Amino acid sequence: MQHCTYRVYHPLTGYYYIGKGDLRRWVKGNYWGSGRRINDAYKKYPQEQWVRELLGSFSTSDEAYLAESQLVTSETLQDPRCLNLVPGGRGNNSRKHTVEERLAKSLRQKGKARGRRTPETALRISLAKKGKKPKPRFTIVCPHCAKSGDSAVMQRWHMDKCLENPHLDAFAINTLVEKRKQTAQRISLAKIGRSNGHTGLRNQ
Ligand SMILES: [Zn+2]
């Protein structure tokens, strides 16, 4: 397997992100960077404004890590145009968010009391539901990965939105993966809320 370092660059602002990965996957367009800052930038500036550049190719992962650690140093991170969150090199990739950052974020979200319904809202929803028949449920099969399941769930994670859908480009996949992460976090926060005695998920 060939390894590579790459840069995703936004010429209009000078923003950039540097990463490493499997060269073949890079060529296929699989890498667009990850992390809070690059994702925020993607929300702001459309895909066609970004330029992907191959910086180097290597026959071992170690060499690629070494190159990445030289490209993304703690000084590089001081550059406001650099969208990386952590220095390059082995062992840094799991520290995109520190434990403190994650805890602080979780506390902030709880402070917003997402996921809690006022008694009035709960009553209104419950009354509304009594007037309605539950939606019919049926099983469908995803044509891309052959998984089957409840149609509502499948429509959310598979069918057109399946990560194996060949019509999705790397940018769309990046967006989907990010949305999934956010959903997973929302669900886990809702669970924390429930275990504290609160009930009800936020309306989807
Ligand atoms: Zn699927």
Image (cartoon, rainbow, N blue to C red):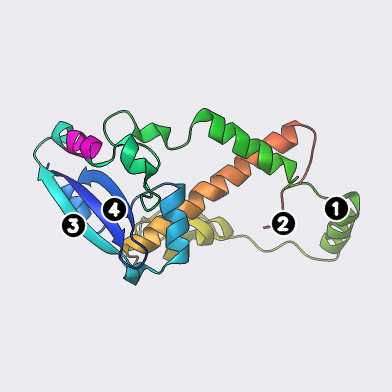
Res. 39 visible in picture: yes
Q: Answer yes or no: do the residues labelled 2 and 3 have beta carbons within 8 Å?
A: no
What residue is shown at x 38% (from left), y 42% (from top)?
Answer: 78
* Residue shown at the point (32%, 51%) measured from the top left: 17
- For badge 1, the amino acid type reads Ala
Specify the amino acid type for callout 3.
Answer: Val
Residue bearing the label numbered 4: 31
- As for residue 69 lying within the magenta part, the answer is yes
Residue wearing tag 1:
122
Magenta part of the protein: which range?
64-70
Which sits earlier in the primary sequence, circle 4 or circle 2? 4
Q: Quadrant of the N terminus?
A: top left
Q: Inspect the image, locate mark 4, and give the three-letter code of the amino acid beneath it.
A: Tyr
Name the secondary structure under disc 4: loop
Callouts 3 and 4 close, C-beta under 8 Å: no
Distance, label 1 to label 3, CA atoms, is 51 Å
Residue nearest the viewer, comparing 29 with 63: 63
Tell me: residue 144, above or below residue 55. below
What element does badge 2 sit on?
loop
- Of callouts 4 and 1, which one flags the residue occurring earlier in the amino acid sequence? 4
Which residue is at the far left? 59
The residues tagged by marks 2 and 3 sit, at their Cα atoms, a distance apart of 40 Å
Looking at the image, residue 143 sits to the left or right of residue 71; the answer is right
* Mark linked to residue 203: 2
Name which of mark 1 and mark 3 comes first in the sequence.
Answer: 3
